[in-house]
Image (cartoon, rainbow, N blue to C red):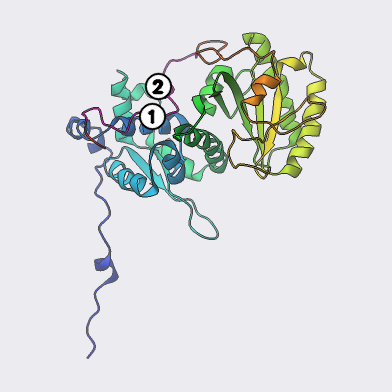
Amino acid sequence: MLTNPTPQRALRGHMPRRPTPRAATTGEHHAKLAARLTQRDRWLARMLYEHKVLTTQQIVELCYPSMRAANHRLLDLFKWRIVDRFQPFVTSGTAPMHYVLDIAGAVALAYEDGRDPKSIGYRHEDAIGIAHSMRLAHTVGVNGFFTALVALSRRPEARGCLTAWWSELRCGRLFGDMVRPDAYGRWCDGDDQIEFFLEFDFGTEDLGKLSRKLYGYERLAMATGITTPVLIWLPTSRREVNARRVLAEALSQLDHPALVPVATSAADAAGEDNPAATRWLPLSDPAPRRMRLVELARRWPHVDPPSPAAPSPAAPAQQAELAAPDPLPPSTTSRFGGRP
């Protein structure tokens, strides 16, 4: 005998209840968050403020022991409006979840630093708007380069450690009148250290435009008195060969080519699949061979050892942004002594 079936919507679980944008900024909501947010939660919110967007896998590489643990905690942070999330459209398969900073997370960070939330330049529509940005894949790629270095740093047997990671936006505020690198980083391995600017090539940029950036790096080195290597990450070995030819020509036309040490690598280069591995080719080497990231510091002895502070030709015009977070996560123990 036919009966009315149960409606499909009745079989679905309820969506997590989230406070409205207005409720997420109230004192009552933040009073509850004070007892719930761990140091790791706050650090992750600060990383999202600095680097705009991170995928679930990148967040696991940054600060979680497993995908399951990350998803469990990220759901809580989503419910509390610390983070927001979206899935980009892909033609086949399923894209990973992408996370951005949400309203309650931005307010918590501002008050943590003793700032007015309106002064830090956060707007939720801008944060979630990256879902529609033509630079989404590029931003995720740059962040993946550094989360891979963080994952290496977190290994129990790790020798190397990422000690600095600045976003494109922060680099632009400091160096934008001369050059706009995709990121700045500092990698330490034993007694050796190297700081670098990253140019992340996605295969869509004209190689001539890429090579012209070397003139800006020369100007920056002359203005700061600091020689900082430039690492160029390319999608394929074939494009790397073509890029090296164009870059070498541009480097030879600089007045002071020694001020711009350049090394290239390709995503499909043989060997370990991480940026610190033996995959970097110095540009000016007459007989180039692949080197580890830290070996480049020995290859360029004229490069001064990194100082505790990152290179800065001038202070930002406005001190509205929050301080750059430590690239490594804090202890997984909460500030109240419990487990997150």
SS for dot 2: loop
Question: In the rendering, which numbered label is found on residue 117?
Answer: none
> Label 1 sits on what residue type?
Arg
Q: Estimate the x, y position of residue 313 in percent, counting from the top left.
A: 57, 11
Q: Estimate the x, y position of residue 155 in percent, counting from the top left.
A: 46, 35
Return the residue nearer the eye: 292 or 50: 292
Q: Quadrant of the N terminus?
A: bottom left
Horizontal arrangement in the rendering, residue 202 relative to residue 187 (left or right) = right
Label 1 crowd bin: few (<14), some (14–19), many (20+), radius 10 Å: many
Image height of 44 relative to 184, above or below: below
> Label 2 sits on what residue type?
Leu
Number of numbered markers: 2
Please give the name of the residue rendered at 45% of the width and 15% of the height, measured from the top-left corner.
Answer: 318
Residue highlighted by disc 1: 46
Instruction: Indicate whether residue 329 is drawn in magenta.
Output: yes
Disc 2, disc 1: CB below 8 Å? yes
First in sequence: mark 2 vs mark 1: 1
Instruction: Indicate whether residue 286 is drawn in magenta.
Output: no
Please give the name of the residue rendered at 78% of the width and 24% of the height, measured from the top-left corner.
Answer: 284
Q: Quadrant of the C terminus?
A: top left
Magenta stretch in the rendered image? 316-337
Horizontal arrangement in the rendering, residue 331 relative to residue 194 (left or right) = left
Residue highlighted by disc 2: 322
Q: Estimate the x, y position of residue 319 in percent, counting from the top left.
A: 43, 15
SS for dot 1: helix
Horizontal arrangement in the rendering, residue 26 relative to residue 139 (left or right) = left
Return the residue nearer the eye: 72 or 77: 72
Please give the name of the residue rendered at 43% of the width and 36% of the height, measured from the top-left corner.
Answer: 62
